[in-house]
Image: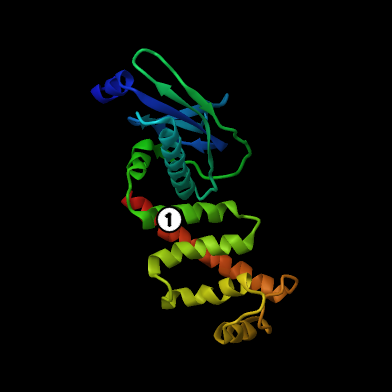
Amino acid sequence: MTEQEKGIDEASHWDANFKLDWDILEYSIKDCDGIKSNVKTNELGSIFLSGFSLVIPSVSAEEALIIAVEKGNRVADYLGSIHNLPVQAFLLNITEIKPKGEVKTGIAQFAVCGNIHKPVNLDFGNIKNLLFCSDPKLLRQLAHYNFGLRYSHDPINQFREFYLVLEDKYGKGHPYLERYSYVRHALNHPELDRPKFAQRLLAKIGASHIDPSSPEAKKLVEEKLRDLKQDAKDIIVDISKLI
């Protein structure tokens, strides 16, 4: 046990335990001070990350809950970004640990489901850097990307979330966003109030609005959403290198 870990064990703090909404297959998992993995293995020896626990400093119960949820969301956003997978972390319980062994526990509900993804060599040391990140733009982009992945059956919200990743990078009104902005606006406004966008749609699909029943409109949205998602993913990959 390191001196830092020993200090955590001896001092008052909170242990916050989280359950992921599905088990994530990994090649390997490396824990670090303050973040511990909850791991499952199958009969073939495959490793699955099923959850994690975080050490929260000694604060009031209300503050500990707020800190735990915020940091748990950051871990989920990071896991989602490196796996290209929608990930949610649900707080199972948060327990106050005191030197004399006194405990107080709060319980949160959780849900379980599944998905397909690519495993990685997961190092919680990288996630630890994210927990102390104070860059609101970086945190927003990770959150928007993860929300976009979650909206896999909702193209309107998915388009919006991925678009916001790009908007944070380039800024509102940037020329690069024009390849997507007219579609995004049309998805949010059945009757376009911007003539320039309406004219562009007319040239693309023969209509000045997006009709969900139109094959041409559906094809345009699918193509633009695919490209937008890739652009957002490329930005997130670059961000991950900075964490």
Relative to 79, does residue 91 appear above or below in the rendering? Answer: above
Q: Quadrant of residue 221?
A: bottom right
Q: State the residue at coordinates (43%, 57%).
A: 141
Relative to 78, does residue 170 appear above or below in the rendering? Answer: below
Which element type, helix, strand or loop, lies under badge 1?
helix
Q: State the residue at coordinates (30%, 21%).
A: 11
Number of disc labels: 1
Q: State the residue at coordinates (42%, 40%).
A: 71
> Where residue 108 appears, x then y in whole percent?
56, 32
> Where residue 92 appears, x then y in whole percent?
53, 30
> Where residue 222 appears, x then y in whole percent?
62, 67
> Where residue 173 appears, x then y in whole percent?
43, 76
Q: Residue furthest right?
A: 213
Q: Residue furthest left?
A: 3
Q: Amino acid at mark 1?
A: Arg
Q: Quadrant of the N terminus?
A: top left
Residue 194 appears in the figure = yes
Q: Quadrant of residue 102?
A: top left
Relative to 84, does residue 41 appear above or below in the rendering? Answer: above
Residue 231 appears in the figure = no
Q: How is the image coloured?
A: rainbow
Label 1 sits on residue: 140
The residue lying toward the viewer, choosing from 238 and 90, is: 90
Q: State the residue at coordinates (54%, 56%).
A: 148
The residue lying toward the viewer, choosing from 32 and 48, is: 32
Q: Residues within 10 Å of mark 1 (few under 14, many from 20)?
A: some
Q: Is residue 189 left or right of residue 61?
A: right
Q: Is residue 193 left or right of residue 58?
A: right
